[in-house]
Image (tube, rainbow, N blue to C red):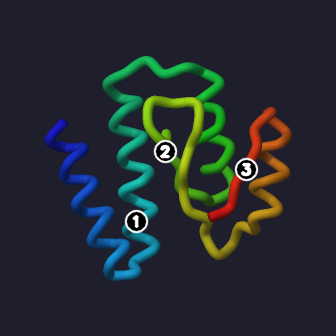
Amino acid sequence: MQHFAELTTQARKAILDRDHAELSRRIDENFDTRLSICQLPVGQVRMVETARRLGASAKFAGSGGAIIGTLSEKTSYEELQHAMTGIGCHTIRA
């Protein structure tokens, strides 16, 4: 749990510094850490993997069932939306 707290602090700093690359790394590390210690539902892992294949960062938003992440400059929201729809997911842009 201490590692997750450290990731949160690092992600907050990245947001304040407007450091997109660092924020993306912390988001991905959060999910990767969770995956290394828990057996996660295949369908929910697929959401993260689909987003990441397009260059987005992604992690669970809470206990699973939804993900949150950031898009890289090389990926359009429309590409992400299409890919997520293809696996039965809806997207919301904030």
Amino acid type at image mark 1: Leu
The residue carrying mark 2 is: 59
Q: Which mark is residue 5?
A: none
Residue 34 shown left or right of residue 44 in the figure: left
Q: Is residue 9 above or below residue 66?
A: below
Residue 83 shown left or right of residue 62 in the figure: right
Q: Nearer the viewer, residue 74 or 18?
A: 18
Residue 87 shown left or right of residue 5 in the figure: right
The residue carrying mark 1 is: 23
Q: Residue at x 76, y 43 (%)?
A: 90
The residue carrying mark 3 is: 91
Q: Residue at x 19, y 44 (%)?
A: 3
Residue 70 occupies which quadrant of the picture? bottom right
Residue 26 shown left or right of residue 61 in the figure: left
Report crowding for label 2: few under 14, some 14 to 19, many 20 or more residues within 10 A (C-alpha): many
Return the disc, 1 or 3, that comes first in the chain's sequence.
1
Q: Residue at x 44, y 37 (%)?
A: 62
Secondary structure under badge 1? helix
Residue 58 picture location, percent across and down: 53, 49
Return the disc, 2 or 3, that comes first in the chain's sequence.
2
Report crowding for label 1: few under 14, some 14 to 19, many 20 or more residues within 10 A (C-alpha): many
